[in-house]
Every structure is written in C-alpha cells, then in structure tokens.
Image: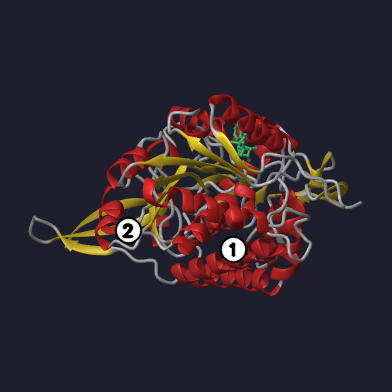
Amino acid sequence: MTIYQNLIGGEWVGSDATRNINPSDTNEVVGLYADGTVEDTKNAIAAAKAAFPAWSRSGIWERHVILKKAGDEIMARKDELGALLAREEGKTLPEAIGETIRASQIFEFFAGEALRLAGEIIPSVRPNIGVEITRDPLGVIGIITPWNFPIAIPAWKIAPALCYGNTVVFKPAELVPACSWAIVDILNRAGLPKGVLNLVMGRGSVVGQTMLDSPDVTGITFTGSTGTGRRVAAASIEHNRKFQLEMGGKNPMVVLDDADLSVAVEAAANSGFFSTGQRCTASSRLIVTEGIHDKFVAALTAKLETLVVDNALKPGTHIGPVVDEKQLKTDTDYIEIGRKEGAKLAFGGELIKRETPGFYLQPTLFTEATNQMRISREEIFGPVVSVIRVKDYEEALATANDTPFGLSAGIATTSLKHATHFKRNSEAGMVMVNLPTAGVDFHVPFGGRKGSSYGPREQGKYAAEFYTSVKTAYTLA
Ligand code: ADP
C-alpha cells in the first residue's frame, strides 16, 4: 500500500506509517500515512520560516491564482473527495460532498480577498504628516485541526493564512490524514513555492506539542477540545504568540409555545443528530416551554424513528457511525450518566449492528433533564440530546445562557418580539432563528464566546483580524 507522506519544504517525506480505519466498516483500512516526528516538525517550521520573506512579498495575483486553482480542483473532484471524507470520518456521503463544496467555496472566497487587500490613509493630527494603516502577515502560522470537519476546517484556516501572506505548518487530527493530505496535494500542485505550506501528520503530543514549543511559530489557530485549547493558550502566552481557539459547545435550542412545530422538529433533528451530532455547533440542549413540550417530544421522537443509521456511503443513510471506538465509549458513558442522573431515555441509547461492522449508535433523546445535570453541562460530541422543560420565554433564555459555553444558540418561534429579544440577549457568538444551530455560511464570521472560543473570529473578511498584524506608519511630507 502507498504511504501518503508529509510535505516538508516542498519534499514528500516520511516512512513510518500509521493507518486509518473506516468507521462504517472497521475491516477497511483507508490508507497508510506518515507519522511525523519531532525532527520532521522542526524541519517543517524551519522551511516555513525560510519561505516567509518571499511569500509575504508575493504578488496578490499569484496568491489569487493559486487559491482559485485549488478551489476549482476541489469543486471538480467533489464527489471523489466527498467519498473519501465519508469513508474516513463517517459522515454521510451527501454531508461529505456538501463539506467538500464548502471547502472549495472558502478557497474561492479567499482567492477574491487576495485581490482586495487594502489599507487606510488618514491625516495626522499634526500638520504635514500622513498616516498609513496597513496589515502585515504574522509569519509562520501553526494550524492544528480536529477530525470532525476534515476538509472544511483546514480550508478555512489554510486559505486565509496564505491569502494574507503567511506560511503554514499544518497538523491535522490523527483520525483524518486522508482528507488533509488531499487538500495539501492540491495546493502544492496549484503552484505554491516550496516551504509555504507544510503538512506534518502525526500525534498531537509529538507534532502538535513541538509546534506549541517553537518560538518560530508566530501564530497558532486551533480547533479541538477545551483541554488541548488550554495547552495551546498557555504555551502561546509563554512565547508572546498570537493564538485563536475554537473549542466546545453545549448549544441550546429554545422551542416556544408559538413555534411552528414542523420547523422546530426539523431544526432540532438536524442540529442534534445530523453529522452524528459531531459538530461543535450541534444542539444538545432543547429548551422547550410547557405548552408545546409534549407535542414537540412526540413529533421529534416520531421523526427520529424515520432516521436511518447505517454505513456513511450507503444511499438512504441519514446518520453515519460515530467516528471511533473512543468517541463511542464517551457517548455510551454519557448515556449511562444521563440515566443515573434521572433523565428519562425517550428514544435510542443502544448500539446497532449493520451489514458492515462499524460504530453505530441510535440517535438518543433524553427528556425530563435539568440544566444542572452533567449531560446538559458537558459537551458529549455525539448523537445524544436532552430536552429541558421550562415555564416561559424568560426561563428559556436564562437556561440557554446558563452554560460555560457560547458558540451557537437557536430559537424556534413565530414571535418577532421573542426572536428579536433572543438575538440581542443570547450569550452566543452565533444565533439562529427558526434554523438549526449548525450549518453556517462560509463568507461570514464564525466563532463563539465564553468557554467556546478565544481570539478573533474565523472566516469571511473578519479572518484578517487573526492572520495579520496592523501597522501604523507616519510620514513627514
Ligand atoms: P478531540 O478530542 O476532538 O480529538 P483534541 O483537542 O485532542 O480534540 O485534538 C484536536 C487537535 O489537537 C488534533 O489535531 C490533536 O492531534 C491536537 N493535539 C492533541 N494534543 C496536543 C498537544 N499536546 N499539543 C498540540 N496539539 C495537540
């Protein structure tokens, strides 16, 4: 079997290999991938540092052409890359193709942004002096990504990093090297000079930690768990380095008595269970007012009955497998915790056997949960959702905000007054009215508050806040 290697200083290197497994069919090895060492990582950082001066001064047309070419190739290969993603990560084929299209759109967007780089000229308060405000690239950006969006998240970090003139060391999650390799191969062939983009697949404790410990990594953008995010923060403060963190969520969706029932049920089913609940924007707390509670639970349960859990590549599958055995154990442990805490298991909770051996879990719904239970406070990252009954809108809003997290929040209502009030008073970075809490556009800011995020927003033109450093220059005329 071919070993897909790391890209360091423009060369494909590495012979030690790890394998990754298809979570829909654990007999299938997706591929063999280089297992990066400390030395590989140091070489990649050195290559990125050496490539920075030239790339930071490269022409905006060159950057545009490369990013556009990558976006075009990803779009042209969306079915093939989507199938690879579905095999490697376990989301359904339509979801995986959708994610691939989004990655392409992100490259197209930043190809455009490269042509729109601009600054400001402002008069000084002193006569005969001009002030120019420009944005400089940071230098070497360390990109550390999770497994749940293995094409889109690398795209939304790599594209702006390159667009604004930075060089990159990219370390993907251990479970998803295939998608990461494919994206880097595309960008490399699109014409990036040697060392501008380096790929080091390997372990977090080895490759990731070496990036955190290097004074030559001038910015780190991280998406992953809260625990690792804290390590990134501590190490980055040590080096006085800029960093950006996207971590967990415990996203609420409020359903009010006046909601359109079918809109509420569709949004809850989508944001709670699609992508196997493995989205940081998934709704895991459904906060439902008394008047609609029983109707809503009955309709959502009926909807869950119709959802097919099966092999991610099989037509008709609505929910693919859980990503791996470790995550499956986390999910089933939390189901046990929920039972012991006194929540009522209204649907699911069991493992399922399918034609191909995989990590299949029924969508799981708890009712009669309280907001103080662990299943309502801690991120599970699986298809496990709890319903919390509340008296009225005021209690719903207070419950929605009573969480250590603040990524996304939703409300299902036909009341303009409550929708407007919720948009203003929700303590989340993203608010959805009559829409799932997950599923966002690629050209507008993405990010949260409180324990969910740290640093500037990702995506859209707001990405410039992280990937550049503002310079103010004064000139005597
Ligand atoms: P998850 O629980 O979703 O796997 P992690 O935070 O463990 O979340 O992983 C997110 C990313 O962080 C992965 O690419 C992982 O390899 C990386 N990572 C894990 N440990 C470290 C570390 N000590 N230093 C840097 N990166 C790490």
Q: Which mark is residue 161?
A: none
Give the quadrant of the C terminus: bottom left
Location of residue 305 by image quarter: bottom right
Does 207 appear above or below 393? above
Helix, strand or loop status at disc 1 = helix
Q: Which residue is at the far top?
A: 340
Of label 1 and label 2, which has the lower sequence position?
1
Location of residue 86 by image quarter: bottom right
Does 172 appear above or below 258? above
Residue 427 at x, y percent in the picture? 33, 44
Dot 2 crowding, Cα within 10 Å, few <14, some 14–19, many 20+: some
Q: Is residue 22 left or right of residue 421?
A: right
Residue 398 at x, y percent in the picture? 31, 39
At x 44%, y 54%, the residue is 446
Whether disc 1's CB lies below 8 Å from ligand 1 is answered: no
At x 65%, y 62%, the residue is 95
Q: Work out whether residue 187 or residue 363 is closer to the camera in this orientation and state it.
A: 363
Whether disc 2's CB lies below 8 Å from ligand 1 is answered: no
Amino acid at dot 1: Ala
Amino acid at dot 2: Thr
Distance (Cα) linking label 1 and label 2 = 28 Å
Q: Work out whether residue 464 or residue 421 is closer to the camera in this orientation and state it.
A: 421
Q: Is residue 16 left or right of residue 128?
A: right
Q: Which residue is mark 1?
A: 103
Residue 287 at x, y percent in the picture? 42, 44
Does 243 appear above or below 259? above
Q: Specify the quarter for ligand 1.
A: top right
Colouring of the image:
secondary structure
Q: Which mark is residue 134?
A: 2
